[in-house]
Amino acid sequence: MNIQCIKTILGEDIIATVEETLSGDIKLSHPFMVMIMPQDGQYTIGLAPYLSFANTKTFSYKKEHVMMMFEPATELRNEYVRITGQGIVIPKSDLSLVK
């Protein structure tokens, strides 16, 4: 499973399971908008369904409409996996010295 964050030319931030098609388009499965929201004087990240009014959960994007694609931070990836029920949650690494 290839979970990626995408920044579109419209400025949208999307997290989705991504595949590249034979035509070179990008197929997004279970996409969510990544939203930064103020909360108690700080900022938090929320996920909202992308095109929630659509009858499908898979969309094609033209490659030229994608400005960048990158691997999400572990916490964001884990939240996406939790919401969609796909994949495995990656545990937080807690490296400590053994005494």
Image (cartoon, rainbow, N blue to C red):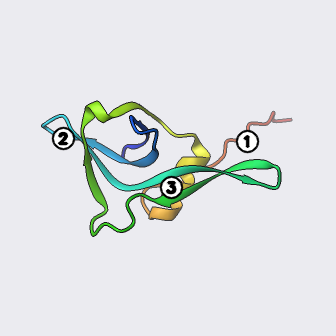
Image point (81%, 33%), residue name: 97
**Which three-letter amino acid code belongs to the residue tagged 1?**
Asp
Q: Secondary structure at mark 2?
A: loop
Seen as rendered, the residue at the extreme left is 23
Disc 3/disc 1 C-alpha distance (Å) = 21 Å
Q: Secondary structure at mark 3?
A: helix
Q: Which mark is first along the chain, 3 or 2?
A: 2
Relative image position of residue 65 (x, y in whole percent): 31, 35
Label count reads 3
Where is 81 relative to 54, above or below?
above
Q: Which residue is mark 2?
A: 21
Left/right placement of residue 91 relative to residue 6 reads right
Image point (13%, 37%), residue name: 23
Q: Secondary structure at mark 1?
A: loop
Seen as rendered, the residue at the extreme right is 99
Q: Is residue 90 visible?
A: no
Left/right placement of residue 89 relative to residue 99 reads left
The local crowd at label 3, few if under 14, some if 14 to 19, many if 20 or more residues have their Cα within 10 Å, is many
Image point (41%, 57%), residue name: 50
Q: Is residue 79 visible?
A: yes
> Pointers 2 and 1 in contact (CB under 8 A)?
no
Q: Which residue is mark 3?
A: 80
Tell me, for residue 94, which label it has, or none.
1
In this view, the mark in front (3 or 1) = 3
